[in-house]
Amino acid sequence: MEENKPETGVAHIRPGEGRRSLRVMDEMVTCKITSDRTSGAYSLFEITTQPGAGPPPHVQHWEDESFYVLEGEYEFLDGAGTIRAGVDTLIYVPRGNLHTHKNVGGGVGRMLVTQTPGRTYERFFEEVGRPVKDRLSPPPLEAPPSMEEIVTSAAGYGIEILPPENKAQAKEAK
């Protein structure tokens, strides 16, 4: 995303609008409002997750994250255990905490996700994501970056993705 001068007026994002949709790993990420529109205060994304999908366990060192479930059923790993989250559930993860989510429902799940402050996560999404032209039926991810590339990119944005051996330990913590 290009670096713009912060906007100071009211932002109005209509239904179905968003700055851009990207396929990031197994999820579709639509930027609803980016940090350049909030003077860096936060970013807001709509995340669409297919059944069984979700990111690997990770720690964000530079921002707090909130998840508000709009549709579907998710499980959140918060480092201490698993939280089941359905529609109208809010999960807040302060920076520095191990976490992940997975769509455990039978259909597509959707969430609103904020990062506070904004900027780093949207840059990470831009780097590892692939553009989606049709948000209603995104195509399968072609030529996705390797997990090694994702881990390397994430580190540059203060995101620590657990190596595979630690993922097994995180699962056992459930």
Image (spheres, grey):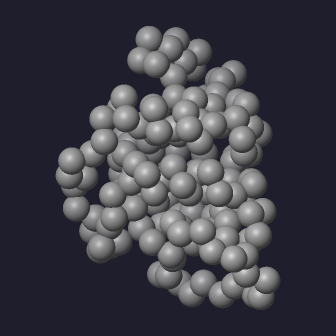
The x and y percentages for residue 172 are 52, 13
Looking at the image, residue 9 sits to the left or right of residue 60; the answer is right
Point 45% across, 31% down: residue: 151
In the rendered view, tell whether residue 14 sits above or below residue 121.
below
The x and y percentages for residue 35 are 67, 66
Tally of numbered discs: 0
Residue 75 visible in the snapshot: no
Looking at the image, residue 50 sits to the left or right of residue 126; the answer is left
* Quadrant into which the C terminus falls: top right
In the rendered view, tell whether residue 101 sits above or below residue 98.
below
The x and y percentages for residue 46 are 53, 64
Looking at the image, residue 29 sits to the left or right of residue 66; the answer is left
Residue 36 visible in the snapshot: yes
Looking at the image, residue 6 sits to the left or right of residue 51; the answer is right
User: Quarter of the image holding residue 14?
Assistant: bottom right
Residue nearest the observer in this picture, 101 or 158: 158
Residue nearest the observer in this picture, 47 or 150: 150
In the rendered view, tell whether residue 60 sits above or below residue 134.
above
Point 37% across, 45% down: residue: 25
Residue nearest the observer in this picture, 120 or 113: 120
User: Quarter of the image holding residue 139?
Assistant: bottom left
The x and y percentages for residue 20 are 45, 72
Point 62% across, 51% down: residue: 120
Point 47% across, 39% down: residue: 153
